[in-house]
Image: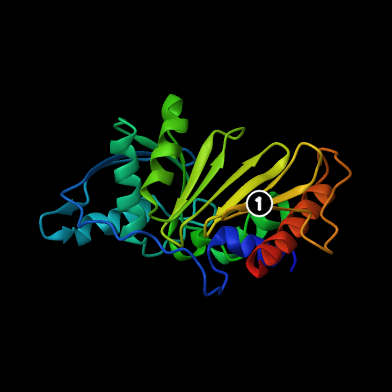
Amino acid sequence: MDRRLFLSLLAGTASLAWQARAVPAPPPSPRRLRLVNAHTGETFEGSYRDASGPIERVMDELCVFLRDHHSGEQTRMDVAVVDFLAAIIEAAGQNTATILSAYRTPETNEALARSTFGVAENSQHLYGRALDLHFGSKLSEAMTAARAMKRGGVGWYPHSSFIHIDSGPVRNWDLGEDGLGSLLFDGRQISFSTKGELLINGPGRVIVGGGKAPLVLRGRVPVTVQQRLGRLRQLARAELVARRH
């Protein structure tokens, strides 16, 4: 187990039989969106669904709007993640959202994975199934509402002021200035104590330390990239221990 496998859990692409699946959502009613792209300055406003389902012409426009802003390339966006976004906007009492990242080409994602902590090599962004969003003062409320829906992955980045959503398996994680704080996956929460110990909270019990794996970072807050990656490797081992208990 290493950083790549653990990040695949964040990406929702690990091939595990016990993966939590999204709760099927009822057929969406006609939906209207107001979006701003933080990098291009472009805006999108309109109904992308009617009583018959997704409107192909408008979905094509959304695919252009949600393109990789680094390369200009686009892909077919998964309507499920667009529906997820619309539901969050409504639940948070907002009328708009700011898009920070949508589709990424393999080249863009690889470059980000080399330079940015927490970017998964096989990200859902590669498949048009993920969005990074900002909701202004309603960001925390939007995150809470998104997790309650159990419609996919929800990553919380409070210090960077955005949330990640995707239409992959249900999983929640927090990523702050100190690195990965916790991961909730298949009913198990994996996190660090204030002493640097890894805690795996399973049904009815808590496993501390994860057996033979060296799961303590000497109680220090990780400040370097190497220390943060060390925590990811520790969490990967802890996830393996959690599955065995």
**Left or right of 157: which side holds 85?**
left
Q: Residue 154 or 114: which is nearer the viewer?
A: 154
Considering every residue shown, the one lying at the far top of the view is 137
Which amino acid lies under the numbered mark 1 shown in the image of this protein? Gly
Query: Residue 142 sits in which quadrant?
Result: top left
Q: Is residue 39 above or below residue 210?
A: above
**Left or right of 221: which side holds 46?**
left
**Left or right of 13: which side holds 61?**
left
Q: Is residue 144 visible?
A: yes
Mark 1 sits on what residue? 118
Q: Is residue 136 above or below residue 53?
A: above
Residue 69 in the image, given as x and y percentages of width and height: 49, 50
Query: Residue 32 sits in which quadrant?
Result: top left
- Category of crowding for the residue at label 1, using alpha-carbon neighbours closer than 10 angstroms: few (below 14), some (14–19), many (at least 20): many
Q: At numbered mark 1, what does the secondary structure look like: helix, strand or loop?
A: loop
Considering every residue shown, the one lying at the far front of the view is 204
Q: How is the image coloured?
A: rainbow
Q: How many marks?
A: 1
Q: Residue 120 or 151: which is nearer the viewer?
A: 151
Q: Residue 193 or 222: which is nearer the viewer?
A: 193
Query: Residue 42 sits in which quadrant?
Result: top left
Residue 154 in the image, given as x and y percentages of width and height: 48, 48
Q: Is residue 41 visible?
A: no
Which quadrant: the C terminus?
bottom right
Residue 72 in the image, given as x and y percentages of width and height: 47, 56
Q: Residue at x 36, y 48 (%)?
A: 149
Considering every residue shown, the one lying at the far left of the view is 51
Q: Residue 133 or 28: which is nearer the viewer?
A: 28
Which quadrant: the N terminus?
bottom right
Residue 4 in the image, given as x and y percentages of width and height: 69, 65
